[in-house]
Amino acid sequence: MPMRTHELHPSLVHAPLALLPATALVDLAAALRPRDLRLDRLGRNLWWTTAAAGLVTGLAGMAASQEIELRSAHARDMMFTHGIGNLAVVLAAVGISAWRTRNAANLTSAASGLLAAGAASYTAYLGGELVYTHGAGVKVLGGAAAEAPALFSGEGVARLGRDAGRGLGWLLRRAYRAVSGRERVARGALGPIAEAGTGAEEPELH
């Protein structure tokens, strides 16, 4: 069975999740051995590799957000939290990469990388909740994902690019509504621990 467009994101997500902590640890080693220029250069190159992997994975995720259907407002808020968190991690990785282009590794760059890795682990956990608790993209539940075209086809490539743009637009518009107070983000969007504090779950939408 061919890979579908919405399945590209989960097939790529392990790369930045593994690269980010590895890159931070290389920077830490380079910071502790400032005379090792090869180690410093390795860290610099790894930062750009990590940023690129995160960007590609993020764009695939934005496309996937437009190709699956979620059955509750609670799940859609969790999708937003997952997406905006990953966008922040990717922007942080790009920023650190740009800084590292002209600067040697130090404890600050290493610590920033470790913090970003922690944040990425949390957003990955939210992604798992979306699939295993809310059924995001599960074919037997139907919805747009069940009709997605094969990834490696003319229609698949066009749809992936179009939906990535739509996904980024949705994420930014939702962020604006949240910041401006026009549409609140449910507390449960942070995961089951936060949800337990509310004392109730949001009803399913049919």
Image (cartoon, helix red, strand yellow):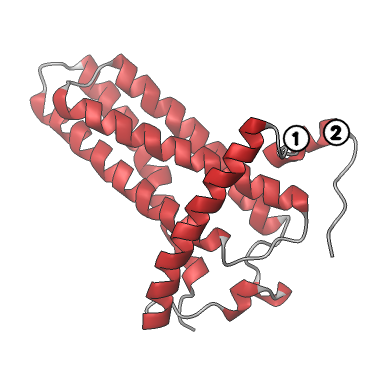
What type is the residue that disc 1 sits on?
Answer: Arg
Specify whether residue 21 is in view: no
Q: For this rendering, which residue is in front, 182 or 85?
A: 182
Pointers 2 and 1 in contact (C-beta within 8 Å)? yes
Q: Label 2: which residue? A: 198
Q: Quadrant of residue 182?
A: top right
Tag shown at residue 187: 1
Asked if 92 appears above or below 86 in the picture, the reply is above
Q: For this rendering, which residue is in front, 201 or 107?
A: 201
Quarter the C terminus occupies: bottom right
User: Looking at the image, which residue is at 73% across and 57% down?
Assistant: 134
Measured in 3D between alpha carbons, the distance from the residue under mark 2 to the one under mark 1, in whole angstroms, is 7 Å
Q: Is residue 73 left or right of residue 4?
A: right
Q: Label 2: how many residues lie within 10 Å, few (<14), some (14-19) or many (20+)? A: few
Asked if 110 appears above or below 77 in the picture, the reply is above
User: Looking at the image, which residue is at 83% across and 30% down?
Assistant: 197
User: Looking at the image, which residue is at 70% across and 76% down?
Assistant: 142
User: Looking at the image, which residue is at 38% across and 23% down?
Assistant: 112
